[in-house]
Image (cartoon, grey):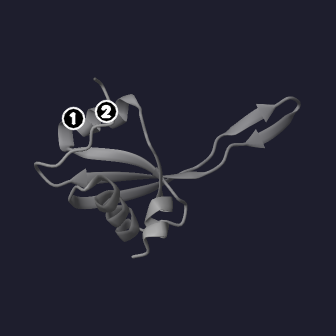
Amino acid sequence: MNHERLMKVLLAPVSSEKAHRIAEQSNQVVFRVALDATKREIASAVEFLFEVKVDCVQVLNVKGKEKRVKQRLGKRQDWRKAYVRLMPGHGIDFGGGA
């Protein structure tokens, strides 16, 4: 696959209580990904960027919430989330602690 495309697939890691719990229990990492990304592209991007082996990828679309903006209703943007399960013995550390 094209390395430029792989660099644009992963947008950011998702940092939440659920994401941390899943990372500890089942060796999965959660990423915010591009709306048009496929499972194969996501797996290839994670393997390319973090030099780990991917077991499987689960993807879900998150619908944007409707929020009030002054006197009108607005809508947040829809986004896509990927749960990436890593092979045993592999891991990604986003802590960056010293």
Q: Residue at x 23, y 59 (%)?
A: 54
Quadrant holding the N terminus: bottom left
Q: Residue at x 35, y 70 (%)?
A: 40
For residue 47, which quarter of the picture? bottom left
Front position in the image: 92 or 68: 92
**What is the three-letter code of the residue carrying label 2?**
His
Disc assigned to residue 48: none
* 89 on left or right of 57: left
Q: Residues within 10 Å of mark 2 (few under 14, many from 20)?
A: some
**What is the three-letter code of the residue carrying label 1?**
Glu
Q: Residue at x 44, y 74 (%)?
A: 2
* Residue 20 in picture, x, y percent from top left: 31, 32
Residue that carries the numbered disc 2 in the rendered image: 20
Question: Answer yes or no: do the residues labelled 2 and 1 have beta carbons within 8 Å?
Answer: yes
* Residue 70 in picture, x, y percent from top left: 86, 29
Q: Residues within 10 Å of mark 1 (few under 14, many from 20)?
A: few
Q: CA distance from mark 2 to mark 1?
A: 6 Å
Q: Is residue 80 above or below residue 92?
A: below
* 45 on left or right of 88: right
Q: Secondary structure at mark 2?
A: helix
Disc assigned to residue 24: 1
For residue 35, which quarter of the picture? bottom right
Q: Residue at x 21, y 53 (%)?
A: 86
* Residue 9 in picture, x, y percent from top left: 47, 60
Quadrant holding the C terminus: top left
Extreme right residue here? Answer: 71
